[in-house]
Amino acid sequence: MNIALSGNAGKDEMDLEDRLNQIIDGRQMVKNANYYAFTATPKNKTLQMFGTPFEQPDGEIGHRPFHEYTMKQAIDEGFIMDVLKNYTTYNSYYKVVKAIEEDPEFEKKQAQKKLRAFVEAQPETIQQKAAIIVEHFHTQVIDKGKVGGQARAMVVTSSILRAIDFYYEIQRQLEERKSPYKAIVAFSGTKEYGGKEVSEADVNGFPSKDIEDNMERDPYRILVVADKFQTGYDQPLLHTMYVDKVLTDVKAVQTLSRLNRCHPKKRDTFVLDFANDADSIQEAFQRFYKTTLLSKETDPNKLNDLIQEIESANIYTEEDVRTLNEKYWAGEEREELDPIINQSVERFNLLDENTQIRCKSSIKSFLRTYPFLAAVMPFKSVEWEMLNTYFMLLVHKLPVLKREDFTEGLLEAIDFDQYRVIKGEEPIGLIGTKPSNSLMNCLSAYRQMKLL
């Protein structure tokens, strides 16, 4: 869009240097145009690109929204629901027993991650959580007439396979209960399940385009998702959310905010969380509850640090980068470009694994950071622009890396013994909320004051 507005699309007869300079100029935001971003969850990049600069007491330049309508104000004025007012966590407790006489040593962090994944994937785990979901939905949502008896629920899972597992188990328990309601599963693309490739349409028995419409009418009441519908889904009848996925920062706010749409018969919302704790969810929401400010601008020197890390691997030369750019911007075919990139891939494959990880990670970070900085920084770098083109073509050819697995043998060393889920009610009070006469809210506020 910037390139189109600025008229910097480039001409065929231009040499490489002129073309690159014009591309860089085109990346920058045009001075005679106004740019606006509307978002409930402003990220640092958004604030720096669209916000109003201001000088802080320490001399640093920060950025604030040019206008604000905060989550707090929207809740107070009744335009959205407070999705944290009735937030409940379920702490998962499980234990494993040794299956071998001598206890092997495993790298702690990776071992814990693998162990939890093993336990969470057990049929017993999914059955127990599905039982809690089905029971709660009927007794606490349907029987209590939430949203005038029209309440819907969403189950947020950690992967497509888990979503399908939960869907089938919830369906089974609904049928066993002789419930009049059904579930729907939503995920993108296809996934191998039960020995065959399946899509959401295969599982649901109707086209994907009908999911949103079907969720508005019976018998469909529970939507099981894996990423899909965690953002942008606008359904006022959605009252309850069951979370079985770790959520952090913006993702936590966007996901739980699926419940915040108002409805004439909607008096409250409810979140039942199997995977997160109240403190982390409060921390995620607090940032966006009132005004969000960016206290420090992105440092362009970050790119120099990334380039230094990449170039220490010696997988390309300056001549490689220039030659590729000349051919690429001249519109030559991939057959002319690939041999240059393939040389870098061959050199990359000779590196030790740790160097490969650092190099590839730095390339990805460069590709995320440069386009943003090029739009806001007051100077131009032809070198960075050429590297951006080179890395853009290179990163897709680099092999998928597997970190050394220090937990090999872990799952063979333990037996799944038992898993139980314990309820822990903990309403979350954000700083800036109105005082309440409720004893629970008072205790919660006092607890939060002590923490802060």
Image: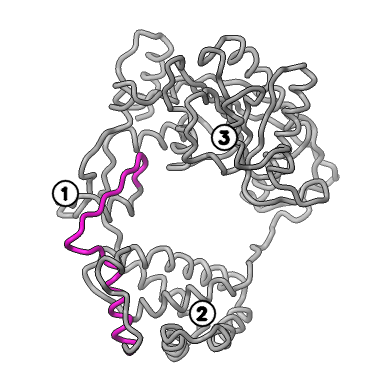
Q: Are marks 1 and 3 in contact (CB under 8 Å)?
A: no
Q: Which mark is residue 56?
A: 1
Among the two numbered marks 2 and 3 on one chain, the one whose residue lies closer to the N terminus: 3
1 or 3: mark nearer the eye = 3
Residue at coordinates 80% horizontally, 42% vertically from top-left? 414
Residue 142 x %, y %: 61, 14
Residue at coordinates 80% horizontally, 32% vertically from top-left? 417
The magenta segment is 15-42
Q: In this view, does 95 lie to the left or right of 387?
A: right
Give SS at disc 3: helix
Which amino acid is tagged 2? Ala
Q: Residue at label 3?
A: 212
Which amino acid is tagged 1? Gln
Q: In this view, does 147 lie to the left or right of 438?
A: right
Residue 11 x %, y %: 32, 83
Q: Residue at label 2?
A: 313
Residue 327 x %, y %: 46, 88
Residue at coordinates 27% horizontally, 56% vertically from top-left? 49
Q: In this view, does 417 lie above or below 395?
A: above
Residue 254 covered by magenta stretch: no
Among the two numbered marks 1 and 2 on one chain, the one whose residue lies closer to the N terminus: 1
